[in-house]
Image: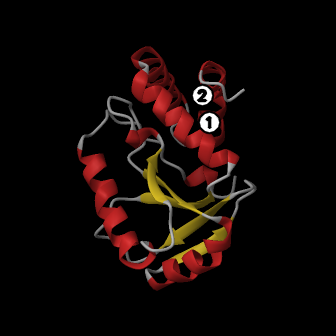
Amino acid sequence: MIGAENWNIIVVPYNPTWADEFKKIERELLTVIKDEVLSIEHVGSTSVEGLYAKPIIDIDIVVESDKFLIVKQKLKELDYEHVGNLGIEGRDAFSYKNKEHLMEHHLYVCNKESKELKRHVTFRNHLRLNDDDRDRYSQIKIEMAEKFPHDIDNYLLGKESVILDIYKKCGLL
């Protein structure tokens, strides 16, 4: 992973302000894309009450496939730059600048049929409804962040068996 040696992996307890921070980002996005999108989903660990997380909001903008180019252009008006699909079909990543007023976030535009979107939403919804899996996932995240505070690849690899087990439970495997 490019720049992985510069990562500082910090996992913190769930913070109820994350939902508000998501809403703040969503409001800004909707100022230019509200007529072009099906939904804007708060996904990732910050979207699950009680789950430990890296304090970065993950957002999936859901679109019909024919709306992608329009949404890409409108996001550019808000200083978001398209960086490609990063190897994941059906999901395109966007970087940003001039967003000091917003919490750090990862922004993706997903085709409504995207497997990655389905995975994000299904995993999020499962963790919201299953405290044992949520807590187990929190625990492995804490352990891996302590063990690999500057090594994102091993942090991710260390969580993999727990994630795959949860994927099986919620029908993703």
**Quadrant where the image shows the C terminus:** top right
**Residue 20 point in image, percent of width and height:** 25, 52
- Helix, strand or loop for disc 2: helix
- Residue 130 seen from this side: yes
- Residue behind mark 2: 159
**Residue 113 point in image, percent of width and height:** 67, 52
Colouring convention used in this rendered image of the protein:
secondary structure
In this view, the residue in front, 126 or 48, is 126
Image label count: 2
**Residue 135 point in image, percent of width and height:** 42, 19
Give the Cα separation between the discs numbered 2 and 1.
5 Å
**Residue lying at 71% horizontally and 59% vertically, measured from the top left:** 86
In this view, the residue in front, 4 or 112, is 112
- Would you say 20 lies left or right of 31 here? left
- Would you say 41 lies left or right of 82 here? left
* Quarter where residue 72 is shown: bottom right
Q: Are marks 2 and 1 in contact (CB under 8 Å)?
A: yes
**Residue lying at 62% horizontally and 51% vertically, measured from the top left:** 4
- Circle 2: is it few (<14), some (14-19), or many (20+) Cα within 10 Å? some
The kind of residue on which mark 1 rests is: Leu
**Residue lying at 47% horizontally and 33% vertically, measured from the top left:** 125
The dot on residue 156 is: 1
- Circle 1: is it few (<14), some (14-19), or many (20+) Cα within 10 Å? some
- Residue 146 seen from this side: no
Q: Is residue 103 above or below residue 80?
A: above
* Quarter where residue 65 is shown: bottom right
In this view, the residue in front, 116 or 94, is 116
The kind of residue on which mark 2 rests is: Lys
**Residue 97 point in image, percent of width and height:** 44, 76
Q: Is residue 147 above or below residue 56?
A: above
The dot on residue 23 is: none
- Helix, strand or loop for disc 1: helix
